[in-house]
Amino acid sequence: MTILIKILQFIMSLSILVIIHEFGHFTMAKLFKTRVEKFYLFFDPWFSIFKYKKGETEYGVGWLPLGGYVKISGMIDESMDKEQMKLPPQPYEFRSKTSWQRLLIMTGGVIFNFISAMLIFIFVLFAWGETYLPTSSVKYGIVTDSVGYSIGLRNGDKIISIDNQKIENFHDITSDIVLNNRKTIQVDRDGVNLNIEIPREYVPKMLKGKGQIDTRIPFGPYVIESFGKKSAARTAGVHLNDELIGIDDKKFTYYDEFQKYLLENKGHSIVLNLSRSGQPQNISVTPDTLGALGIGRSVILSQIFDLKTVKYGFFKSFPAGIDKGLKTISDYLKQFKLIFSKHTKGYESLGGFITIGSIFPGVWDWQRFWNLTAFLSIILAVMNILPIPALDGGHVLFLLFEVITGKKPSDKFLEYAQIAGMILLLALLLYANGNDVLKLLKH
C-alpha cells in the first residue's frame, strides 16, 4: 500500500506539471495566433488512451508517461513532421513568427513551471506555514556513521555553526555543506568547543548517502509497532506492543547505542529484555548479518524536540513563497553543477523515476505533496532550459544563433539536431534509471 501511494502521488504530481508546462507553450502560441495541432499529456506513439478534437487542436492522453507535448504548426519537434516543413510557410505557423515571438513560445513551458512553483510555495506557506527543527533544539546532539567519525565528528556533538555561520534549520546542514563547499564545522562536545575541518573527499561520500549528520534520539520508550518481512524477533516469539527495555540486561540511553550493540553482535545469540502487558519477558534471538532484528517503531520528532512553526498571513506569504522558490532554484542549480564535477562524481548518484518517486511519503500528506510538486516543477523547468536539442533550451539556442548571425539554421540541420537530442535524452534516461536498478540490486 505504501508503494502504491508513492506511485499515485508521483503520477499525479508529474501529470500536473506536464499539463502546466505544455499549457505554457499552448498559451504563448495562441497569444501570437499560432496553430496548435495537438496537446497531449504523455506520449502517444502508435495509439493514445484518450483523445478528442476541439477547433484546430486535438487533446489527448498518451500511454507512455515520459512527459507530454504540444504539436505547433511549422515547428520541428518530437513529432518529426517533415512533410509539413516541405510546404511554403503559412501565416499561422511557428516559422512565420518573429524571433521574439518564437522565443516566448519556446520558453512558455519553462516560464509557467517557474511561476507555478512560486505560486505553490505561496499557497503552502499561507495554508500550513513552515515547521522546522531549529539547530539549537537538537538537545541530544547528532549521530553519524564511520565516515563522519573519520573526519572527527562524534555521536552527541552539538552543531554550533558551519564555517562560523549559524544554520537555523538543522535539516539544512547537510545540504549547506554539500552545496556551498564548506570547510569547517564548529561543534560543542561535552561543553568544549571544537573546530572540525571538512576534507575534500567528504562531499562525494555524502552524495552517496554516507557521513550523514542526523539527530540523536533517545532509545526509549521502544514499543514494537511493526515487523519486517523477515523478522528474527517475530520468529523468536516477540509480539506487537511489546516494549523493548534492553538487551542482555544492558540498558541504552540513545538509539544509536542500541544499533551499535546489534552490529557488534550480528550473527550471535542475544537476549531481548521485554515488557509485555507489564510483565517482564526475556527472549533469545539472533540478529541477521546486517545486525537487524526486523522490528520497528514510529518516531515523532515533535514529541522529542521543540519544533518551530512560522505562520504567514495572506500578504506575507507572497514574498516568503517567492524567496523560498528562488532559494530552491539556486540550490538546485548548485546540485546540478555537482553532477558534472570530476571531484564529487555526482553523476554516480543520478537517479531516475524510482529515485524521484521514492521522495514522496508513504502516506498521503498534502503539504508535502505540494512542496515536492513545487520542487519538481523547478527541476522540470531547469532541465527543459538546458541547451540540448529536443528540449526547449535547444530551440532557444538555435534561435539565439539566428538572432546573432542573422542566419536561420536549415530545416535539415534542425531535423538531425532533434534526432541527436532525442538519442542523448534517451541515453540519459536509461543511465539514470539503470542507476536506480543497480541500487535496488545492491540492497
Image (cartoon, grey):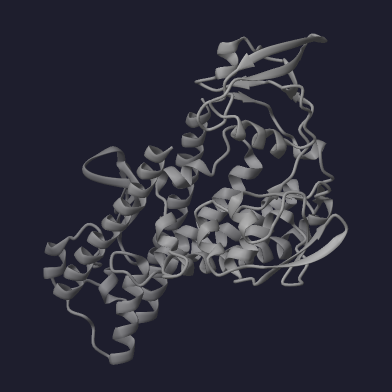
Question: Which residue is at the front of the view, 434 or 429?
Answer: 434
Residue 253: percent from the left, percent from the top?
A: 80, 35
Question: Which residue is at the front of the view, 104 or 421?
Answer: 421
Residue ID at (82%, 43%):
305
Q: Quadrant of residue 303?
A: top right
Residue 93: percent from the left, percent from the top?
A: 26, 69
Question: Which residue is at the front of the view, 377 or 231?
Answer: 231
Residue 289: percent from the left, percent from the top?
A: 50, 30
Residue ID at (59%, 12%):
236
Q: Quadrant of residue 227?
A: top right
Q: Is residue 128 left or right of residue 377?
A: right
Q: Is residue 443 left or right of residue 401?
A: right
Q: Residue furthest right?
A: 191
Question: Which residue is at the front of the view, 33 or 117?
Answer: 117
Q: Quadrant of residue 321?
A: bottom right
**Vertical placement of residue 52 versus 4, above or below:** below
Residue 148: percent from the left, percent from the top?
A: 63, 55
Numbered marks: total: 0
Q: Which part of the image, by quadrant, shows the C terminus?
A: top left
Residue ID at (20%, 72%):
414
Is any atom of residue 41 visible in this view? no
**Vertical placement of residue 8 versus 328, above or below:** above
Q: Is residue 21 left or right of residue 362?
A: left
Q: Residue furthest bottom?
A: 405
**Vertical placement of residue 120 versus 256, above or below:** below
Is any atom of residue 394 visible in this view? yes
